[in-house]
Image (tube, grey):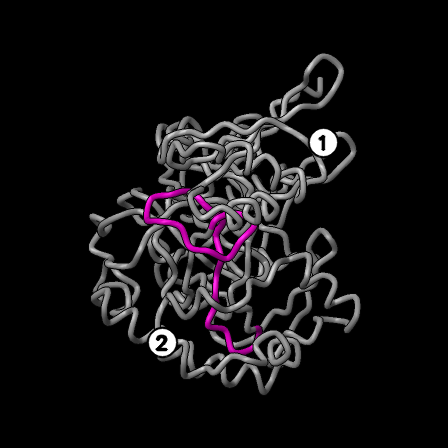
Amino acid sequence: MADHYDALETRSADEREHAQFECLRAHIAASKRAAPAVGAMLADVDPEAVTDRAALARLPVLRKSALGEAQKAAPPLGGFAAGFCGHVFMSPGPIFEPGGVGHDWWRFGRALHAAGLRKGDLLHNCFAYHLTPAGMMIESGARAVGAAVFPGGVGNTEAQVQAAAHLRPGFWAGTPDFLKVILDKAPDLRADLSSITRALVSGGALFPSLRQEYADRGVSVLQCYATADLGLVAYESPAQEGMLLDESVIVEIVRPGTGDPVAEGEVGEVVVTALNADYPLIRFATGDLSAMMPGASPCGRTGPRIRGWMGRADQTAKIKGMFVRPEQIATICDRHKLVMRARLTITRDGEQDAFEIAAEAPDVPDLASAVAATARDVLKLSGAVRIVPIGSLPNDGKVIDDQRKYD
């Protein structure tokens, strides 16, 4: 068990699915009673009927925009909080999130343990402690592991370097780029930061070249995927083959603009149900793109994996002054059952906007003109439609591809 945080990480897929959905049914029932907004959203849902992923996929999706509107109407948290809040945080939008004071409330202990943090270690925490919950997320996870924390926060590069040189932490946490800033500054201050040999980063992309630069400097860096609303969603293990899903979340990958799950391996929007009794966000759409990976991680953890962050799902664009959204493309597909997928590509024709819809479907007479008519009805715009072979569109999660040049 030394290599794994707990026995949950190595249970069978059937065990995990059964336990999570058993918990989910109780979670939905309790949340409907304790959180007014959840009760309203799931008013017609029988918790005992949510027995599998197909049943879960029939529940409504909660989008961040709707959460923001609910918070404006019913401050501070829109009726979605069901338990005591030890803190309230704010993210851009603004969106407000609760923070609990219970044991590892954001569940970061699992990610930190996988990255090498152990009892008795000292962690230099360079995530923000003000407004957003990132700093507290890491700190509560470190306490769960049994490590001490130096709360460095963001900025103040020289002070961070001086503190690290004196305290000799073995572990660092922060955004992917800031560790490089600190390490690059150390020689100017004649500071030895060689004690830092492990790190967990989040809040931005860890590019392969940057990870390799850290490795060349003797620092093993892993990354995790989390949000202020949900806490930990997924994390890397030393195998560095995708990100393992946290044991207390149920993740679906859906077609952007819908709540419809896509096939394994297909890129789509990450929708998360966190089994957090204090803040029961059920089918919460993150707006991020990813894809499920087949098989199990070589590290011995048996949980499902995603490929990591692959961009944003919100592809809303303006064409000739009209907003076009991914859910409208989904509506067009829904009206033509032969159409499996579609992508709207925006270009310029001279000095005017133009678009084409590529629709994956069998080559049926008059289907293109029928889809074009539906597009005019749904989008209030006219554009070309091209029928393409099923499976020929790129697997990148894009529903709207804006190819106009803005510079």
Kind of residue sitting beneath label 2 = Thr
- From the viewer's side, name the closer residue of 297 and 71: 71
Which mark's residue is nearer the viewer, 1 or 2? 1
| Residue located 36% across and 76% down the image | 51
Q: Residues within 10 Å of mark 2 (few under 14, many from 20)?
A: some
Give, as a single range, the part of the protein colored magenta. 255-279
Q: Is residue 269 magenta?
A: yes
**Which one is earlier in the sequence, the residue at label 1 or at label 2?**
2
Please identify the quadrant where the C terminus is shown.
Answer: top right
Three-letter amino acid code of the residue under disc 1? Ile
Residue 350, horizontal then vertical, whole percent: 72, 12
To which residue does mark 2 refer? 51
Q: Is 18 in front, or is 375?
A: 375
**SS under mark 1:** strand
| Element at label 2 | loop
Instruction: In the displayed orientation, state which residue is furthest to the front.
Output: 365
In the depicted structure, whether residue 272 falls above or below residue 155 = below
Q: Tell me residue 81's x, y (percent).
A: 63, 76
Q: Locate the N terminus by quadrant.
A: bottom left
Quadrant in the picture for residue 405? top right
Name the residue rendered at 24%, 58% in the picture. Answer: 302
Within 10 angstroms of label 1, few (less than 14), some, or many (20 or more) residues?
A: some
Q: Is residue 356 left or right of residue 10?
A: right
Indicate which disc residue 319 carries: 1
Q: Nearer the viewer, residue 194 or 360?
A: 360
Q: Is residue 252 magenta?
A: no
Q: Quadrant of residue 212?
A: top left
